[in-house]
Amino acid sequence: MEGVHFLINTLAILAFATILVFASDPSPLQDFCVALNDTKSAVFVNGKFCKDPKLANANDFFFSGLQIARSTQNPLGSTVTAVNVDQIAGLNTLGISLARIDFARNGLNPPHTHPRATEILLVLEGTLYVGFVTSNADNNRLFTKVLNKGDVFVFPIGLIHFQLNVGEGDAVAQAALSSQNPGVITIANAVFGSDPPINPEVLAKAFQVDNKAVEYLQKQFWYDNNN
């Protein structure tokens, strides 16, 4: 009997521990979601509103055209074609999305971060130099690799990363991300192209340069290569 009681108590503790593990807030699915007491003024939820499942159809889970190469005639020489919940409504709540990245020769997908997703990248054509930088606590270590066709590389959630075409011709990669809406923060765009601009004194001190250098950078056109 003592053995039975021990087993029952152990199972009860494990069940309680399991409840505690899952008793947490869901991950945010957009940059922020400000609380409102008056629901009549509410316009967003954490994610998307759901269609009645009885009204769902195959087209809610379908996207066509990712095999088509996108133009890379832009200052970065790269174009990202996202396939997330905005393109496939059926991705809502499923925690996954996809992207195609086209690179011209010497094209760059500039340093950026996905605040809500880990990314796994597969090179379909060409050769890419890729890397990510760890957090301050890990002394901002740089991890890099040259990838060829068929190679795969992982960028951990929230860390700054990049991809540069170092091959002789165009390159194509496909990325899977662990969120229906991963978000993208391109570092240069966010820092020097914010609206309104960040006070130059803040950036001058942060980057240890003079105000003129900051003002020059803030006057540049910061291209967004995400479709």
Image: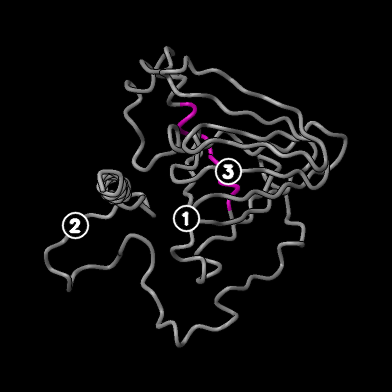
Whole-percent x, y for residue 113 in the image: 50, 38
Numbered tag placed on residue 115 in the rendering: none
Point out the tag, 3 or 1, that comes first from the N-terminus: 3
- Residue 203 sits above or below residue 93 on the image: above
* Residue for point 29% across, 49% down: 4
**Circle 2: is it few (<14), some (14-19), or many (20+) Cα within 10 Å?**
few
Q: Which residue is identified by label 3?
A: 119
Q: Does residue 108 appear left or right of residue 92 in this picture? A: right
Q: Secondary structure at mark 2?
A: loop
Amino acid beneath label 3: Glu
> Which image quadrant for residue 154?
top right
Foreground tag (2 vs 3): 3
Q: Quadrant of the C terminus?
A: bottom right
Amino acid beneath label 2: Ala
> Which image quadrant for residue 34?
bottom left
Q: Does residue 93 appear left or right of residue 124 in this picture? A: left
Q: Which residue is identified by label 1?
A: 181
Whole-percent x, y for residue 205 in the image: 36, 15
Pick the residue in front: 224 or 163: 163
Is residue 105 rendered magenta in the image? Answer: no
- Residue 23 sits above or below residue 141 on the image: below
Q: Main secondary structure of the magenta part?
A: loop
Q: Which residue is identified by label 2?
A: 35
* Residue for point 80% across, 43% down: 150
Pick the residue in front: 63 or 152: 152
Point out the tag, 1 or 2, that comes first from the N-terminus: 2
Amino acid beneath label 1: Asn
- Which residue is outermost to the front? 1
Do the CB atoms of the residues marked 2 and 3 lie less than 8 Å apart?
A: no
Which range is magenta?
Answer: 216-226
